[in-house]
Image (tube, coloured by chain):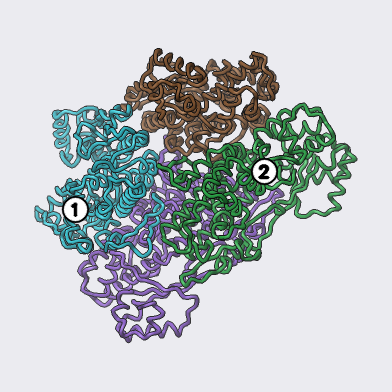
Chain colours: A purple, B cyan, C green, D brown
């Protein structure tokens, strides 16, 4: 299983041109049903409702992360760097390929709605006797454990963890390029060839040659732009809010003993909080969308309305506010209630920086979180010490409150809403 | 409703950069649930199982066809050509936007399996009192009929039909560009700006200025290449065959009174052949994939096996044959039967040129099927009279037989298969 | 002359795809010998010695600036903005096309060596009875004066000046895109379609709609990166230093009465400081390179050595220093003199920020120097008030000293150089 | 000298992204003045007068050919093909890098005007004690001879010759990509990664794996298109005709003892037909352009007119004719003479297929001229046997006569020209 394929295989990829597969184990992993499932999970969740081109899957992204890792390692080996351990190649490639294996349908929303964690699921799928486990065990008895520990960032060799998760890892590089390609937004176009050229292994971790500083600056700026242009786009946030509301409502109805016109097993298990690995593997976005479509004709009006909004893209509108206090929120909620609106479903508050926003922050400690530059005198310096640009943007902490609401419902309730609310939501 | 939007709206598109919407009616059509449904129908059916990037929807493509049509008309109007009728602009744009509205999930396969026709469905959705009908009627009482007749190629002004369906129409231009972009295959990259520049209205149809001949040659070659590289790719054909077998088997079981573990309404209607417009609009690829996933655990072994193959991408292998006679096929089928294999499900014969392959063939008569060049002396000539390249490729009729089969099953049946069969299928 | 061409003409351009010419006057200006001369002046001077792809001319760039200006105005007119004056279209297009007309060969260096100014020359060529003057006068008697005053930033309508010279003008947009394209450096890839969409005329100037803030941030970052990656590249600086030394030496020899093996008229006039417009128009990079090639065999060793260095690309090396005081420089110069090196020609000090570096600096006053955002409430705000990114980089003032020197000569003089000097220049 | 560089060096290249230099000998060759001279010779001669972007030099192209050769060999070595000889790597790389070394300024025209051959000059510069010779000799005493014999297609190992000159060589691949990039014409965009993947060494030559057939079809079509769109563009032909006329006139004047206002040594030697290698190396396009500029004020009217036409781009117009007989030509020439026009300079006849047009022609014999496909059964077949497309275009022999003439002169002579001539040249 550690042997190479008799002939290299390739996948045509719009981002990397070709994905090169050279190892039998990688080829077999790709062909498992566990990995093929990622074709049915979109990389960017509901973003396709904002950027219609962003219909790409985690399958594509996972192949891309694998390919970038392969290229980095290949460059390390061609350059003959002594700080790289060739025997770690396979574990790094497997971890890169499998790192997103546990993502559920519309991952961020489902995790929030059901308190799940995709990293845990990735490790369970690797370890709990699936087709993946079997293939990995053929490499070495404890190989599944090794791969899982890389994903958990606990592997003994930091350098392997660095490749798959660090401020400059293969994951981020692929998603910036890929998300830019599929959305059509230019900001994510980083010079990956240049970045790969300036990475090198050094004393147990991946560092950047000083000559690559500008390429890294450009990479960090691209990330910043992609966050604000794409990942935090308010229309996407609106669709995620509706999605979470569907899950919340359906779960509540389920626990209230409501009889669904349409219900299937992985969903019941999800509502019970008792999903096993086999059921989890049946959870995909096709199922979620099919269920939501069926639920558009449920008797429960709130559920059917929310599902219609999601499926037919009748999203919530939003207003932006620079600041927001508890009192104002309470006011709005009680006005809503008085006007017959639902105080919780008809108003959602969102503050994007609450999300795991990871433009590089140097103050968060050394280990694995920093980008280090190596100069010609073999000194290591954290990049914001050297780059004015990085130092300038490191401190930026940005964010605004957005209030999301169903405009049509508010318009119907108009006569019963106080003036202050009408003004706030720009009604009439 | 004929009035323009107060401010132009845009969609970011990776292929055309921006899609520009200037008319209220177009904006409202895009926001109907009928049009939004196209987000859940892939542009290239099962091609994503061969080219993992090809996950784009008919929604994206439809916007693209609209945009190209808009640009052609805008160029006609800017150039002040007298042969264009400005009052036809809106009907052309609506037909361009809506031309694929009736596509079902995995369109080619479902049409073949259930004898349906997406053009009929497009017209029904336009005409039968849907949200689409309502919006179109606000333009003019008989506007839905006008749009439908463009799609049926029966509209009184050929030039409008030309824009939406002809050998050089906005549909083909968008799909070549878009499919090339999403698969990552370079062959479809046509010089659309150049093509748009050389189109002009002339005596009731769209013709090409002679100076654009090379751009058209290049366009036809790109199409030829895309057909053989992408659209007829044998791995895609394999997945389509399995898909059709699933439909065939499920339909048969349904009519035999089999009790499915999982069944929902639009599917039962489909099996009965009695789908109405409202049910049809609920048919999408999410539903098909969700049903197939559920059916992987059906009791009927054939159905569950076929569904597993499709969902987990365990496709049929194929052998290629230059020629094939009826006798050989009968031989194989009877050998298969004797060895316990299914003579119909375990062997499928495919001959790609049987498909509606439309590299331009001049002999097929004048009307709407030819590309005409207009020279400086205002003479019209069919392009293959002028272009050596087009003349050369016009006669090419290519195709090979492919036999598709489940390799694992054949391998199990190996001892019972005659040598000739083993050799043919390259077994051991 | 104000009438449009009977048929639009196009130039194929790698950056903008097509350059569209619609006006007779533009077409005729392009075909003058004064404008064609720009084909023999490189856009980036000696940068092709660092980035071999950067061989593009000011001719290409000038067409590009014209095209961007045309697109901006066309968008203004299509959008029906009342703050734009359609009668200013032609003067803006002519100024855009001609703004670089007066650049000499290897412009920055020759200007420095001979105290010339390309803007003055541009105005002289426009005004002093050339083919350009004649064509412009056919539009209107004082049209040459109008065009020249736009170039001098003294035109009565600021908005026209804004288009051609401001922090967000057509000039900068074209050169960022074009220089990135030809060098192959990705950093300059700005989203020009997006930027054009967000510009609008407002109260006599060009402002940016607030929704375009991120596109402007990205544009300013691209500029910052291009400055440090390309425009200030130390290898390019080295070649410019040698170029200036050639000019300096040749001028000195000329004034000393030295008899050159090769000398032609525009050069003698240049050395005398008495170039007239007709002679100036004969000055191009072909002449400079041909003269330098001939001078590689001049008797004056310094001149022939410098010319060989330039023509055969044997450039000076450099060392970088964080700070530098006068005393150190004096020390080096006197050590050089003692060792038989030339204290002036063999040591050049360069500090790139001394150049007209124009990353946007808000403190430099309002008029024409600021980028203003227009929000929905029609408030104007300078961009660094709104954008964290722009505020962060506005204060950055960066630069390091570079000492340039002929390594081969220093190596020959090695035994006579003190240790401190050897160490400084990293010799042995 | 055979040793690798201590650290790989790169050149940023817009076409290949990076050019990788790994060998000391390659690095030193690039830095010779003989190779640097190629910066002053444009890759496409006068094509920049038609496509303004095409200002790239043979320096860039030569680096590109080197890089493609390096990648092909690297792929051969990674794949472990036994039919490749690793010891031939360096000779192949040097031949690839140096193959265009002998090109003169505006190569095609100067060769025609002075009966020179760039291949001969390449070999002379390699062999006749230049800086190039010296560096190559450090590899091996007879290494210059080896490199020259590859360029002369006489090297003992055909496979090395194949890489540098064959229907599918590194030279053609680079120029298609590069010329497409710099002109902005899309037709030359070939899938080089795909082509490189399907090449393999086999029994002493480079062949193509059958799976790559479509990529090769596309490559041949791109070549066909580039020939007709770019290389044979009538405007470019017009400028080449004028260029040859300048050379012809100046040579004649020189032999007639005319006293030039401006004349320098490499040109006098050229006119005498006695250029030595050192003089040849001083011939570049800067010199030619500088001389032409000076000659615009020569007393000889014909010479000064021709030089003005070239320098200021006042080119000849042309009419196209499907056929042309000797008699017609004689008629025109005598009418021209009667009207006071110059019967030779004022009429030039051009028939583009007379040029070395090399769309692949299988009938021209086996050796090195054919593209061979290798199928899975290890059978070799010439591509047109297998590909319908290639077979279709192989027979195409296309071309039309073009008559070039100075329109302004003909207009002046109008009253003296017979009606038939006026009609032919579309005058009035």
Q: Is residue A265 above or below residue B339?
A: below
Q: Nearer the viewer, residue A144 or B180?
A: B180
Helix, strand, or loop for circle 2? Answer: helix
- Residue at (74, 43) in percent of width and height: C114
- Residue at the image point whose x is 22% and y is 40% from the top: B368
Same chain assignment for discs 1 and 2:
no
Total labels: the figure holds 2
Relative to residue C234, is residue B373 drawn left or right?
left
Question: In the drawing, does residue B329 fall left or right of residue A379?
Answer: left
- Residue D283 seen in the figure: yes
Q: Position of residue B64 (x, y in %)?
A: 33, 51
- Taking the spot 33% from the left edge, 58% from the top edge, the residue there is A281
Q: Nearer the viewer, residue C13 or D379?
A: C13
Of the two numbered discs 1 and 2 in the rendering, the one whose residue sits closer to the viewer? 2
- Residue at 70% x, 40% y: name it: C276
> How far across and how far down the image is residue B256, in percent?
9, 53
**Subunit bearing disc 1:** B
Q: Quadrant of the N terminus of chain D?
A: top right
| As drawn, C206 above or below B58 | below
Report in which chain the residue with disc 2 lies.
C
Density class for disc 1 (Cα within 10 Å; few <14, some 14-19, many ≥20) is many
Residue that numbered label 2 is attached to = C107
Q: Report, in whole angstroms, how far the alpha carbon at label 1 lies from the one at label 2.
A: 63 Å
Q: Seen in the image, is D185 located left or right of residue D46?
A: left
* Residue D131: percent from left, percent from top: 69, 24
Residue assigned mark 1: B148
């Amino acid at each position: 299983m550690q042997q190479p394929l008799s002939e290299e295989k390739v996948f045509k990829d719009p981002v990397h041109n070709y994905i090169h597969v050279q190892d039998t184990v990688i080829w077999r992993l790709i062909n498992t049903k566990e990995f093929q499932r990622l074709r049915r999970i979109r990389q960017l969740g509901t973003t396709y409702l904002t950027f219609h081109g962003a219909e790409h899957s985690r399958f594509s992204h996972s192949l891309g992360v694998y390919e970038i890792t392969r290229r980095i390692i290949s460059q390390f080996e061609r350059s003959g760097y002594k700080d790289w351990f060739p025997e770690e190649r396979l574990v790094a490639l497997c971890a890169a390929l499998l790192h997103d294996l546990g993502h559920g349908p519309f991952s961020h929303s489902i995790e929030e709605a059901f308190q799940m964690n995709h990293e845990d699921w990735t490790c369970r799928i690797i370890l709990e006797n699936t087709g993946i486990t079997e293939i990995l065990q053929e490499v070495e008895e404890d190989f599944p454990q090794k791969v899982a520990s890389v994903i958990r960032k606990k592997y003994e060799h930091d350098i392997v963890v660095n490749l798959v998760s660090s401020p400059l890892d293969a994951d981020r590089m692929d998603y910036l390029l890929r998300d830019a390609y599929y959305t059509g937004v230019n900001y994510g176009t980083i010079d990956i060839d240049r970045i790969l050229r300036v990475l090198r292994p050094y004393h147990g971790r991946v560092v950047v040659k000083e000559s690559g500083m500008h390429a890294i600056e450009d990479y960090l700026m691209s990330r910043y732009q992609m966050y604000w242009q794409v990942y935090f786009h308010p229309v996407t946030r609106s669709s995620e809010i509706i999605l979470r509301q569907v899950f919340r409502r359906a779960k509540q109805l389920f626990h209230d003993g409501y009889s669904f016109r349409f219900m299937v097993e992985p969903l019941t298990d999800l509502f019970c909080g008792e999903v096993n690995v086999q059921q989890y593997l049946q959870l995909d976005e096709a199922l979620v969308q099919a269920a939501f479509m069926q639920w558009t004709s449920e008797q429960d009006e709130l559920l059917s309305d929310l599902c219609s909004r999601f499926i037919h893209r009748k999203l919530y509108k939003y207003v932006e506010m620079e600041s927001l206090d508890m009192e104002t929120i309470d006011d709005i909620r009680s006005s809503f209630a008085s006007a017959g609106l639902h105080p919780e479903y008809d108003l959602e508050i969102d503050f994007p920086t609450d999300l795991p926003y990871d433009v590089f922050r140097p103050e968060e400690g050394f280990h694995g979180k920093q980008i280090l530059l190596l100069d010609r005198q073999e000194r290591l310096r954290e990049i914001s010490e050297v780059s004015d640009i990085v130092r300038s943007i490191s401190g930026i902490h940005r964010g605004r409150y957005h209030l999301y609401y169903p405009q049509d419902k508010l318009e119907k309730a108009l006569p019963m809403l106080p003036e202050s609310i009408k003004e706030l939501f720009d009604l009439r």
